Image: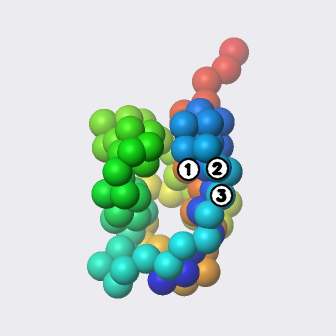
Amino acid sequence: MKLELRFFASLREGLGLSGESITTPLEVKTIADLRNYLVQRGNPWAEVLAGSKVIRCALNQEMMSDSTALIEGAEVAFFPPVTGG
């Protein structure tokens, strides 16, 4: 499946890139699968996207849960939780 990835804030800084076009294996079907697939690349991916870290995700600019199914050609954005006051 072809996807457009976007990384924001500290994730972008940790990975050293703001986006990437990728083609995933057939077994990558959800956002959680995608995150696990990226972590398997090793560092810095494993460090930045580790499962223990809270990371928000959007699919085609809509907030989604990790269990959301991916769609061919979708934009998937990862970013840290936002706080403010």
Residue drawn at x 38%, y 69% as measured from the top left: 30
Q: Is residue 17 left or right of residue 56?
A: right
Q: Identify the residue position indicated by label 2 in the image.
A: 17
Dot label at residue 78: 1
> Callout 3: 10 Å neighbours few (<14), some, many (20+)?
some
Residue 26, image x and y in percent?
Answer: 35, 84
27 or 71: which is nearer to us? 27
Residue 40, image x and y in percent?
Answer: 31, 57
Residue drawn at x 69%, y 15% as measured from the top left: 85
Q: Amino acid at mark 2?
A: Leu
Circle nearer the N terminus (1, 2) = 2
Q: CA distance from mark 3 to mark 1?
A: 10 Å
Circle nearer the N terminus (3, 1) = 3
> Callout 2: 10 Å neighbours few (<14), some, many (20+)?
few
Q: Is residue 62 visible?
A: no
- Establish if 21 lies above or below 46: below
